[in-house]
Amino acid sequence: MILAERAARVEAEALAARAAAVSSGTEALIARLKLEIEKLRRELYGSRSERKARLLEQMELQLEDLEANATEDELAAEHASRATTVKSFERRRPSRKPFPEHLPRERVVIAAPESCACCGSTRLSKLGEDVTETLEVIPRQWKVIQTVREKFSCRQCEAISQPPAPFHVTPRGFAGPNLLAMVLFEKFGQHQPLNRQSERYAREGVDLSLSTLADQVGACAAVLRPLHALIEDHVLKAERLHGDDTTVPILAKGKTTTGRAWVYVRDDRPFGGASPPAALFYASRDRSGDHPERHLRQFTGILQADAYAGYNGLYLPDRKPGPVTEALCWSHARRKFFVLADIAANARRGKTAPPISPIAFEAVKRIDLLFDIERDINGLPTEERLAIRSERSAPLVAELEEWIRDERAKLSRHAPTAQAIDYMLRRWEGFSRFLADGRICLTNNAAERALRGLALGRKSWLFAGSERGAERAAVMLIGTAKLNDVDPQAWLADVLARIADTPQGRLSDLLPWNWTAQSARLVA
């Protein structure tokens, strides 16, 4: 009965996965047809206004996400159907055009078998060959690699021998790992949407449609998810994390909604830790406090973040498996004072500028003394950092607390400087916790640096096509590669080329910090 129940559950999951794949494929087909209809309408009757052009770009971006979703769901349905009698779903794709004749061909012949795989005889006779064409790119030089698989028949038993076909990330695919790495890095690292990439490739003489590129992105996201799971496990086992979030406009019906991108950074280098740094990204439709609680449900260390109320549930004493320790960011506190004491900004504003606050100016000077000490001890072991802080930073913090309490008593509660002071005094325990733990940093700048790429990218891609599109960006692990001083494009190309032949237990060899060491050994 248990086995029957388990088999029924597996078959039901396979049916659900197939239904999801059918639905995603249908949505992608509808979006592609709508886009083609709008393009035809514009070509025949429509105005060539800027507004119409923006509408077509929005439809192309939406199609990009739907095509990638459909490919991910198709691969999931194929994986779920292997252990059941449920028929695998194969999505209809537009017929692929032959590669341009002007591209050079590089013929790579796989070594022929020396003996028959069936009977072991060495009497092999060549019958013919199959040629698999893979589109590959060398920076700004396109070529088609022809992988030749010769067929041989055994004159003794008539069995046919042939090497296996080369691996492609997409089933029945055609794109090589270097081409895929370039597309992924351009999209998620350089923030160039696929429709712009498609136009650029067309100008170079290679026709790669938006739908084709989106298909490859969805397949790569599915292939890289095991590495994302390893990064997630590594980050959440940290003693201390930096956490932050930023806005990500997400396309909705007739408008965009303000979603969020969350990042959690493990970086033990400031206190001399040996663990490699890594960044973990998530995406959500809103900024509810449920999201960080779900992301960090197994984490019990130190969280360095701003004073966002959504983190408060993590700090509760009765939280399971244990409370998270709060450590607040002095850069956030300093910024509130700096705005009121920015002489250069006031000079630009001219006569309309508000007067410089002497209290805010003095607060910035006092906080900067703490930053000077932190620069001196960055990278030292925990014990040394704690000893220097006890000797040099603790007296400054005590003087700062006494001074701002005295100044606060003289101010109205509505004064801007009073609000900046209250921000610190209400959370003084979180701000002063760095004096008792050498692992804690003074700021949360590590998380803010990790989000800087998204902030810059918003000006280029304007919005994400869907929440799943935002999640796909998190899977690419480009931020972790950068933290480990690894070229993201080179790393992605090598990972996509090797991941199919890498056993499950050796996937950690492909992580950026291990990949660097392995590359050095190969060069040697």
Image (cartoon, helix red, strand yellow):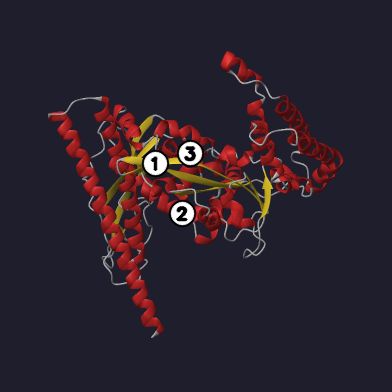
Which residue does the numbered mark 2 point to in the structure image?
Answer: 225
Is disc 1 placed on a helix, strand or loop? loop
* 10 Å crowding of disc 1: few (<14), some (14-19), many (20+): many
Q: Nearer the viewer, residue 155 or 361?
A: 361
Q: How far apart are the two marked residues, 3 and 1, measured between alpha carbons?
A: 22 Å
Location of residue 442 in the rendering, given as x and y in whole percent from the top left corner: 71, 40
Label annotation for residue 489: 3
Select label 3 or label 1 by which is in front.
1
Answer with left or right where residue 171 lies relative to residue 238. left
Of labels 2 and 3, earlier in sequence is: 2
Which residue does the numbered mark 1 point to in the structure image?
Answer: 464
Q: Residue at x 36, y 43 (%)?
A: 108
Label annotation for residue 168: none
Select label 2 or label 3 by which is in front.
2
Q: Nearer the viewer, residue 153 or 109?
A: 109
Please indicate, yes or no, whether residue 128 appears anywhere in the rendered image. Answer: no
Select label 2 or label 1 by which is in front.
1
Q: Quadrant of residue 354?
A: top right
